[in-house]
Amino acid sequence: MSESIINIELKNVYKSYGDKSVLSDLNLTIPSGSITAIMGISGVGKTTLLRLIAGLEAPDSGTVTPAPVKVSMLFQEDRLCEQLTATENVTLVLPCSDRASKKALYEDIQKHFSQTGLDLAAHEASPVRDLSGGMKRRVALVRAMIYPSDLVLLDEPCRGLDEATKELAVNYIKKERRGRTMIIVTHDEAEALSYGGTVVRL
């Protein structure tokens, strides 16, 4: 993890799409190394906030600093390569230096899958398009968490998961954070509190 990451600050941020104002005069500081859960009703700007922090969009006015060099992001959509296997999807985001030993890499990825309750033994050679929605979500989550980033942005990581699987996913997220700054969007109050960080309501 890079030592250059400092506090993320949003100052007097405004963002609109056409005539619809999404964020208005938002001021927020997210300390380095912290966990922040973002809550709010649909359409209040939670996803937009993540995209601004990731540098995928710019505010209409105001400032967002800094722009982290290495960001991993789980979008609302899984955004998997449907023709590839689950393991291949995760391997895509890893640096070439991590691919030296295919056997060790494969075993490490399977350990990550296992922590989320994923048993892909029967689907090892299957493309992810053949997996259920909940399985795809966990593959996407593992891909976001395993990437060696400074900042982790998770947009509804437990979407579509049942309560038992959600608990596994939350525990996995906390275990694999490894001190990184993490910002999580969720609609679930209990989930937001379970991360043990700060809850911000938009």
Image: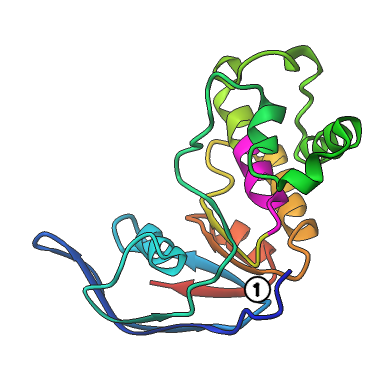
Which quadrant of the figure contains the N terminus? bottom right
Callout 1 environment at 10 Å: few (<14), some (14 to 19), or many (20+)?
A: some
Q: In the figure, 172 relative to 59: above or below?
A: above
Front residue of 83 and 42: 83
Answer left or right for 25 relative to 131.
left
Q: In the figure, 184 relative to 169: above or below?
A: below
- 117 in the magenta segment: no
- The quarter of the picture where residue 20 lies is bottom left
Q: Residue furthest left?
A: 19
Q: Give the range drawn in magenta.
A: 138-148
Q: State the residue position of label 1.
A: 197
Residue 179: percent from left, percent from top: 75, 71
The structure residue drawn at horizontal position 61% and vertical position 59%, both measured from the top left corner, is 190
Residue 156: percent from left, percent from top: 51, 50
Answer left or right for 13 relative to 120.
left
The structure residue drawn at horizontal position 75% and vertical position 17%, both measured from the top left corner, is 124
User: What is the three-letter code of the residue carrying label 1?
Assistant: Gly
Magenta segment's dominant SS is helix
- The quarter of the picture where residue 12 lies is bottom left
